[in-house]
Amino acid sequence: MFDFYRGRRLRTTPALREMVRENEIRPQDLIMCYFVVETDDPDFRSPISSMPGQCQLSLKQLEKQVGEAVKNGLHSCMLFGIPAEKDEVGSQAYAEDGIVQQAIRMLKAKWPELIVIADTCLCEYTSHGHCGIVSSKGEVRNDPTLDLLARTAVSQTKAGADIVAPSDMMDGRVAAIREALDEAGFTDTPIMSYSVKYASAFYGPFREAAEGAPKFGDRTTYQMDPGNGMEGLREAAADIEEGADIIMVKPGMPYLDMVRMLRDNFDTPVAAYQVSGEYSMIKAAALNGWIDEQSVVMESLVAFKRAGADLIISYFTEDVLKTLNG
Ligand code: PBG
Protein backbone atom coordinates (compact mmCIF):
# COMPACT_ATOMS: atom_id res chain seq x y z
CA MET A 1 0.00 0.00 0.00
CA PHE A 2 1.21 3.55 -0.76
CA ASP A 3 2.68 4.84 2.45
CA PHE A 4 1.18 8.31 2.51
CA TYR A 5 1.93 11.04 4.98
CA ARG A 6 -0.17 10.73 8.11
CA GLY A 7 -0.19 14.25 9.55
CA ARG A 8 -3.09 13.31 11.78
CA ARG A 9 -0.83 11.09 13.92
CA LEU A 10 0.44 14.13 15.80
CA ARG A 11 -3.05 15.59 16.24
CA THR A 12 -4.76 12.75 18.04
CA THR A 13 -4.76 14.18 21.57
CA PRO A 14 -4.48 17.63 23.16
CA ALA A 15 -1.26 16.51 24.85
CA LEU A 16 0.34 15.50 21.56
CA ARG A 17 -0.78 18.67 19.83
CA GLU A 18 0.68 20.73 22.65
CA MET A 19 3.93 18.82 22.43
CA VAL A 20 4.52 19.64 18.75
CA ARG A 21 3.07 23.17 18.76
CA GLU A 22 5.58 25.47 17.10
CA ASN A 23 4.36 28.83 18.34
CA GLU A 24 2.71 30.05 21.49
CA ILE A 25 1.75 33.33 23.11
CA ARG A 26 3.63 34.16 26.28
CA PRO A 27 2.63 36.99 28.64
CA GLN A 28 6.02 38.63 28.09
CA ASP A 29 5.33 38.86 24.33
CA LEU A 30 2.38 41.17 24.88
CA ILE A 31 2.16 44.95 25.13
CA MET A 32 -1.07 46.66 26.21
CA CYS A 33 -1.93 50.23 25.10
CA TYR A 34 -3.46 52.89 27.31
CA PHE A 35 -4.90 56.31 26.52
CA VAL A 36 -4.25 58.71 29.37
CA VAL A 37 -6.06 62.03 29.56
CA GLU A 38 -4.95 65.24 31.23
CA THR A 39 -7.89 66.05 33.48
CA ASP A 40 -8.62 67.26 37.01
CA ASP A 41 -11.28 64.61 37.41
CA PRO A 42 -9.71 61.52 38.99
CA ASP A 43 -12.85 59.50 38.13
CA PHE A 44 -12.55 60.30 34.41
CA ARG A 45 -13.05 57.09 32.47
CA SER A 46 -14.54 57.65 29.03
CA PRO A 47 -15.45 54.66 26.87
CA ILE A 48 -14.18 54.82 23.30
CA SER A 49 -17.29 54.09 21.27
CA SER A 50 -15.45 52.60 18.28
CA MET A 51 -13.34 50.35 20.54
CA PRO A 52 -15.78 48.57 22.88
CA GLY A 53 -14.03 47.71 26.14
CA GLN A 54 -11.36 50.44 25.81
CA CYS A 55 -11.46 53.75 27.65
CA GLN A 56 -9.67 57.04 27.89
CA LEU A 57 -8.37 57.18 31.45
CA SER A 58 -7.37 59.76 34.03
CA LEU A 59 -4.06 59.12 35.79
CA LYS A 60 -5.93 57.66 38.75
CA GLN A 61 -8.01 55.36 36.55
CA LEU A 62 -4.88 54.31 34.68
CA GLU A 63 -3.30 53.37 37.99
CA LYS A 64 -6.34 51.29 38.90
CA GLN A 65 -6.49 49.52 35.58
CA VAL A 66 -2.78 48.79 35.35
CA GLY A 67 -2.88 47.51 38.93
CA GLU A 68 -5.46 44.90 37.91
CA ALA A 69 -3.53 43.99 34.76
CA VAL A 70 -0.24 43.61 36.63
CA LYS A 71 -1.97 41.14 38.96
CA ASN A 72 -2.84 39.15 35.84
CA GLY A 73 0.74 39.20 34.59
CA LEU A 74 1.00 42.39 32.53
CA HIS A 75 4.62 42.69 31.45
CA SER A 76 4.61 45.83 29.36
CA CYS A 77 2.41 48.69 28.26
CA MET A 78 2.57 51.56 25.80
CA LEU A 79 1.16 54.98 26.55
CA PHE A 80 -0.65 57.54 24.43
CA GLY A 81 -1.42 60.96 25.88
CA ILE A 82 -4.32 63.33 25.37
CA PRO A 83 -3.23 66.77 26.59
CA ALA A 84 -5.59 69.48 27.87
CA GLU A 85 -4.13 71.97 25.38
CA LYS A 86 -2.80 71.41 21.88
CA ASP A 87 -0.70 73.81 19.82
CA GLU A 88 1.00 74.13 16.43
CA VAL A 89 4.23 72.49 17.60
CA GLY A 90 2.83 69.87 19.99
CA SER A 91 4.69 71.28 22.96
CA GLN A 92 2.85 69.06 25.45
CA ALA A 93 4.61 66.08 23.84
CA TYR A 94 7.91 67.21 25.35
CA ALA A 95 6.69 69.13 28.40
CA GLU A 96 8.29 67.90 31.60
CA ASP A 97 4.88 67.73 33.27
CA GLY A 98 3.11 66.48 30.12
CA ILE A 99 0.42 63.90 30.72
CA VAL A 100 2.47 60.97 29.40
CA GLN A 101 5.48 62.05 31.45
CA GLN A 102 3.25 62.13 34.55
CA ALA A 103 1.83 58.72 33.71
CA ILE A 104 5.29 57.21 33.21
CA ARG A 105 6.49 58.55 36.58
CA MET A 106 3.43 57.18 38.33
CA LEU A 107 3.65 53.72 36.71
CA LYS A 108 7.38 53.33 37.26
CA ALA A 109 7.09 54.42 40.90
CA LYS A 110 4.35 51.86 41.54
CA TRP A 111 5.61 49.01 39.35
CA PRO A 112 9.34 49.35 38.69
CA GLU A 113 9.38 45.98 36.90
CA LEU A 114 6.71 46.93 34.36
CA ILE A 115 8.22 47.82 30.97
CA VAL A 116 6.74 51.20 30.13
CA ILE A 117 6.96 52.20 26.47
CA ALA A 118 6.28 55.76 25.34
CA ASP A 119 4.84 56.31 21.88
CA THR A 120 6.95 59.15 20.56
CA CYS A 121 4.94 61.32 18.17
CA LEU A 122 3.41 64.77 17.92
CA CYS A 123 -0.04 64.05 16.45
CA GLU A 124 -1.88 63.77 19.75
CA TYR A 125 -0.38 67.11 20.80
CA THR A 126 -0.60 69.27 17.67
CA SER A 127 -3.64 71.44 16.96
CA HIS A 128 -3.59 70.33 13.29
CA GLY A 129 -3.25 66.62 14.20
CA HIS A 130 -0.22 65.91 12.01
CA CYS A 131 2.82 64.01 13.22
CA GLY A 132 5.20 66.86 12.41
CA ILE A 133 5.57 70.60 12.02
CA VAL A 134 3.29 71.99 9.31
CA SER A 135 4.46 74.74 6.94
CA SER A 136 2.33 77.71 5.87
CA LYS A 137 1.56 75.75 2.68
CA GLY A 138 0.20 72.88 4.73
CA GLU A 139 3.15 70.54 4.17
CA VAL A 140 4.45 68.33 6.96
CA ARG A 141 8.10 69.32 7.26
CA ASN A 142 10.59 66.56 7.95
CA ASP A 143 13.82 68.05 9.26
CA PRO A 144 12.44 70.72 11.61
CA THR A 145 10.32 68.00 13.22
CA LEU A 146 13.32 65.83 14.15
CA ASP A 147 14.44 68.08 16.98
CA LEU A 148 10.99 68.04 18.58
CA LEU A 149 10.78 64.25 18.35
CA ALA A 150 14.21 63.97 19.94
CA ARG A 151 13.15 66.33 22.73
CA THR A 152 10.00 64.25 23.25
CA ALA A 153 11.98 61.01 23.49
CA VAL A 154 14.45 62.54 25.96
CA SER A 155 11.70 63.96 28.16
CA GLN A 156 9.84 60.61 28.16
CA THR A 157 13.05 58.83 29.10
CA LYS A 158 13.80 61.36 31.84
CA ALA A 159 10.35 60.60 33.24
CA GLY A 160 11.36 56.95 33.37
CA ALA A 161 10.25 55.36 30.09
CA ASP A 162 12.02 52.05 29.50
CA ILE A 163 11.65 52.18 25.72
CA VAL A 164 10.75 54.97 23.30
CA ALA A 165 8.74 54.15 20.20
CA PRO A 166 8.78 56.76 17.43
CA SER A 167 5.61 56.42 15.33
CA ASP A 168 5.79 59.62 13.27
CA MET A 169 7.48 58.26 10.11
CA MET A 170 9.76 61.27 9.61
CA ASP A 171 12.99 60.28 7.86
CA GLY A 172 16.05 60.30 10.08
CA ARG A 173 14.15 60.36 13.34
CA VAL A 174 15.76 57.25 14.79
CA ALA A 175 19.23 58.78 14.34
CA ALA A 176 18.07 62.09 15.82
CA ILE A 177 16.50 60.36 18.81
CA ARG A 178 19.49 58.04 19.35
CA GLU A 179 21.89 60.96 19.32
CA ALA A 180 19.78 63.02 21.72
CA LEU A 181 19.30 60.10 24.12
CA ASP A 182 23.02 59.36 24.12
CA GLU A 183 23.88 63.01 24.72
CA ALA A 184 21.49 63.08 27.66
CA GLY A 185 23.23 60.01 29.09
CA PHE A 186 20.51 57.51 28.15
CA THR A 187 22.75 55.21 26.14
CA ASP A 188 20.89 52.16 27.47
CA THR A 189 17.38 53.22 26.46
CA PRO A 190 16.19 51.11 23.52
CA ILE A 191 14.34 52.52 20.54
CA MET A 192 11.43 50.49 19.18
CA SER A 193 10.86 52.05 15.79
CA TYR A 194 7.58 51.94 13.91
CA SER A 195 9.71 51.11 10.87
CA VAL A 196 7.16 49.67 8.48
CA LYS A 197 4.14 51.82 9.18
CA TYR A 198 1.48 52.18 6.54
CA ALA A 199 -0.95 55.00 5.82
CA SER A 200 -3.82 52.80 6.95
CA ALA A 201 -7.56 53.17 7.31
CA PHE A 202 -7.28 50.61 10.12
CA TYR A 203 -6.20 53.46 12.44
CA GLY A 204 -9.70 54.98 12.29
CA PRO A 205 -10.84 54.08 15.82
CA PHE A 206 -7.48 55.15 17.31
CA ARG A 207 -8.08 58.67 16.10
CA GLU A 208 -11.20 58.82 18.23
CA ALA A 209 -9.32 57.25 21.13
CA ALA A 210 -6.30 59.56 20.97
CA GLU A 211 -8.09 62.56 19.48
CA GLY A 212 -5.31 62.88 16.92
CA ALA A 213 -7.05 62.88 13.54
CA PRO A 214 -5.43 65.27 11.06
CA LYS A 215 -7.57 68.41 10.67
CA PHE A 216 -6.71 68.58 6.97
CA GLY A 217 -5.21 66.18 4.46
CA ASP A 218 -3.98 62.75 5.47
CA ARG A 219 -0.74 60.98 6.35
CA THR A 220 0.09 59.61 2.89
CA THR A 221 3.14 61.86 2.44
CA TYR A 222 4.87 60.30 5.42
CA GLN A 223 3.37 56.88 6.09
CA MET A 224 3.91 54.00 3.64
CA ASP A 225 1.73 53.13 0.67
CA PRO A 226 -0.17 49.86 1.30
CA GLY A 227 0.87 48.57 -2.13
CA ASN A 228 4.54 48.49 -1.19
CA GLY A 229 6.47 45.59 0.29
CA MET A 230 10.11 46.01 -0.77
CA GLU A 231 10.05 49.58 0.51
CA GLY A 232 9.55 48.13 3.98
CA LEU A 233 12.99 46.54 3.74
CA ARG A 234 14.54 49.93 3.00
CA GLU A 235 12.70 51.54 5.91
CA ALA A 236 13.73 48.80 8.33
CA ALA A 237 17.34 48.76 7.11
CA ALA A 238 17.57 52.54 7.52
CA ASP A 239 16.14 52.40 11.03
CA ILE A 240 18.52 49.63 12.10
CA GLU A 241 21.43 51.56 10.61
CA GLU A 242 20.31 54.63 12.58
CA GLY A 243 20.15 52.67 15.82
CA ALA A 244 16.73 51.03 16.16
CA ASP A 245 16.82 48.15 18.64
CA ILE A 246 13.39 46.74 17.77
CA ILE A 247 11.62 47.17 14.44
CA MET A 248 7.85 47.21 14.10
CA VAL A 249 5.24 46.45 11.47
CA LYS A 250 1.93 48.28 11.67
CA PRO A 251 -0.94 47.45 11.10
CA GLY A 252 -0.58 43.78 11.96
CA MET A 253 -2.92 41.22 10.44
CA PRO A 254 -3.19 42.76 6.94
CA TYR A 255 0.62 43.02 6.85
CA LEU A 256 1.80 39.63 8.15
CA ASP A 257 3.84 39.28 4.96
CA MET A 258 5.90 42.25 6.15
CA VAL A 259 6.44 40.66 9.56
CA ARG A 260 7.80 37.58 7.81
CA MET A 261 9.90 39.68 5.44
CA LEU A 262 11.56 41.55 8.32
CA ARG A 263 12.07 38.31 10.25
CA ASP A 264 13.79 36.70 7.25
CA ASN A 265 15.97 39.70 6.44
CA PHE A 266 17.08 41.07 9.82
CA ASP A 267 18.21 39.64 13.13
CA THR A 268 16.73 42.56 15.09
CA PRO A 269 13.69 41.75 17.28
CA VAL A 270 10.44 42.34 15.40
CA ALA A 271 7.22 43.72 16.87
CA ALA A 272 3.79 43.68 15.26
CA TYR A 273 1.00 46.10 16.15
CA GLN A 274 -2.56 44.80 16.01
CA VAL A 275 -4.11 48.23 15.57
CA SER A 276 -7.38 49.79 16.64
CA GLY A 277 -9.33 48.85 13.50
CA GLU A 278 -8.29 45.22 13.83
CA TYR A 279 -9.49 45.26 17.44
CA SER A 280 -12.78 46.90 16.48
CA MET A 281 -13.50 44.44 13.68
CA ILE A 282 -13.04 41.44 15.95
CA LYS A 283 -15.08 43.10 18.71
CA ALA A 284 -17.90 44.06 16.37
CA ALA A 285 -18.22 40.56 14.95
CA ALA A 286 -18.02 39.02 18.42
CA LEU A 287 -20.63 41.41 19.84
CA ASN A 288 -22.93 40.34 17.03
CA GLY A 289 -22.40 36.73 17.99
CA TRP A 290 -20.83 36.00 14.60
CA ILE A 291 -17.47 34.75 15.87
CA ASP A 292 -16.14 33.44 19.15
CA GLU A 293 -14.07 36.33 20.49
CA GLN A 294 -11.62 34.45 22.67
CA SER A 295 -10.76 31.86 20.02
CA VAL A 296 -10.41 34.43 17.25
CA VAL A 297 -8.19 36.63 19.42
CA MET A 298 -5.85 33.79 20.35
CA GLU A 299 -5.70 32.64 16.72
CA SER A 300 -4.97 36.17 15.50
CA LEU A 301 -2.15 36.59 18.01
CA VAL A 302 -0.47 33.26 17.38
CA ALA A 303 -0.49 34.20 13.69
CA PHE A 304 1.87 37.07 14.57
CA LYS A 305 4.23 34.64 16.26
CA ARG A 306 4.05 32.24 13.31
CA ALA A 307 4.83 35.11 10.94
CA GLY A 308 7.96 35.78 12.98
CA ALA A 309 7.04 38.51 15.48
CA ASP A 310 8.76 38.49 18.86
CA LEU A 311 6.48 41.11 20.38
CA ILE A 312 2.82 41.91 19.87
CA ILE A 313 1.14 45.18 20.68
CA SER A 314 -2.56 44.48 21.12
CA TYR A 315 -5.58 46.05 22.80
CA PHE A 316 -6.61 42.48 23.68
CA THR A 317 -3.57 42.06 25.96
CA GLU A 318 -5.50 42.33 29.24
CA ASP A 319 -8.08 39.77 28.05
CA VAL A 320 -5.42 37.41 26.75
CA LEU A 321 -3.55 37.48 30.06
CA LYS A 322 -6.75 36.32 31.73
CA THR A 323 -7.14 33.56 29.12
CA LEU A 324 -3.53 32.45 29.63
CA ASN A 325 -4.11 32.33 33.38
CA GLY A 326 -7.04 30.00 32.71
C1 PBG B 1 0.58 58.13 16.16
C2 PBG B 1 0.01 56.77 16.16
C3 PBG B 1 -1.11 56.26 15.48
C4 PBG B 1 -1.27 54.95 15.90
C5 PBG B 1 -0.24 54.67 16.79
N1 PBG B 1 0.55 55.80 16.92
C6 PBG B 1 -2.04 56.95 14.56
C7 PBG B 1 -1.62 57.31 13.21
O1 PBG B 1 -0.49 57.10 12.79
O2 PBG B 1 -2.46 57.88 12.52
C8 PBG B 1 -2.37 54.03 15.49
C9 PBG B 1 -2.66 52.91 16.43
C10 PBG B 1 -3.95 52.21 16.23
O3 PBG B 1 -4.69 52.41 15.27
O4 PBG B 1 -4.25 51.38 17.11
N2 PBG B 1 1.26 58.52 15.03
Image (tube, rainbow, N blue to C red):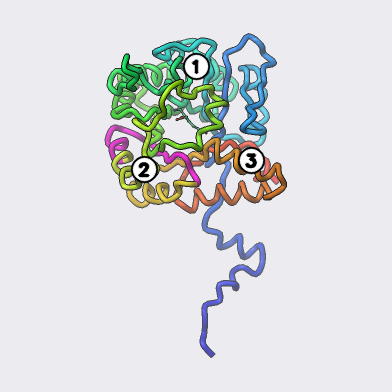
Q: Secondary structure at mark 3?
A: helix
The picture places residue 258, in percent across and down from the top left corner, at 40, 47
| Distance of label 2 from label 1 (alpha carbons) | 28 Å
Name the residue type under label 3: Leu
**Residue 184 shows in the view:** no
Q: Nearer the viewer, residue 235 or 225?
A: 225
Within 10 angstroms of label 2, few (less than 14), some, or many (20 or more) residues? some
Residue furthest to the bottom in view is 1
The picture places residue 57, in percent across and down from the top left corner, at 62, 21
Q: Is residue 39 above or below residue 118?
A: above
Q: Left or right: where does residue 259 sit relative to residue 171?
A: right
Q: Which residue is mark 2?
A: 268
| Distance of label 1 from label 3 (alpha carbons) | 26 Å
Q: Residue at x 55, y 29 (%)?
A: 114
The picture places residue 18, in percent across and down from the top left corner, at 61, 60
Q: Which residue is mark 3?
A: 321
Q: Residue at x 37, y 50 (%)?
A: 261
